[in-house]
Image: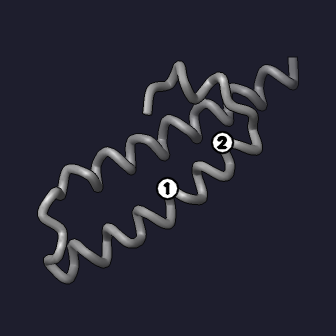
Amino acid sequence: MKAKELRKKSRKELQALLNNLRKELAELRFKIAAKQLKNVRKFREVRKDIARILTIIREKKEDNKK
């Protein structure tokens, strides 16, 4: 997901998306451990999406403080 798209969302939407991605990451970890996942790159993409969301949430918090 692009950062531009994420910045348009509200903080509640970002939190909901973050929770979903964390659940997906846990499922991917289990699949990798069980050798059921063929597209291992998906794991990296989900981690990066989580990092993007956390960054944007922090940016929004800093904007509210100013």
Identified at 31% across, 78% down, the residue is 30
> Which is nearer the N-term, disc 1 or disc 2?
2
Identified at 68% across, 34% down, the residue is 58
Residues at marks 1 and 2, CA–CA distance in whole angstroms = 10 Å
- Residue 14 falls in which quadrant of the image? top right
> Callout 1: helix, strand or loop?
helix
Identified at 66% across, 52% down, the residue is 16
Quadrant of image for the C terminus: top right
- At label 1, the amino acid type is Leu
Left or right position of 25 against 17: left
Check the image and report above or below for 10 versus 18: above
Count the marks: how many?
2
- Residue 33 falls in which quadrant of the image? bottom left
Check the image and report above or below for 5 versus 20: above
Quadrant of image for the N terminus: top left
- Residue 8 falls in which quadrant of the image? top right
Where residue 41 is drawn, which disc sits there? none
Left or right position of 49 against 14: left
Q: Nearer the viewer, residue 66 or 33?
A: 33
- Please state the horizontal and vertical placement of residue 10, each as a whole percent of the image: 74, 33
Where residue 14 is drawn, which disc sits there? 2
Identified at 62% across, 24% down, the residue is 7
- Please state the horizontal and vertical placement of residue 29, each as a whole percent of the image: 31, 71
> Callout 2: helix, strand or loop?
helix
Q: Which residue is mark 1?
A: 21
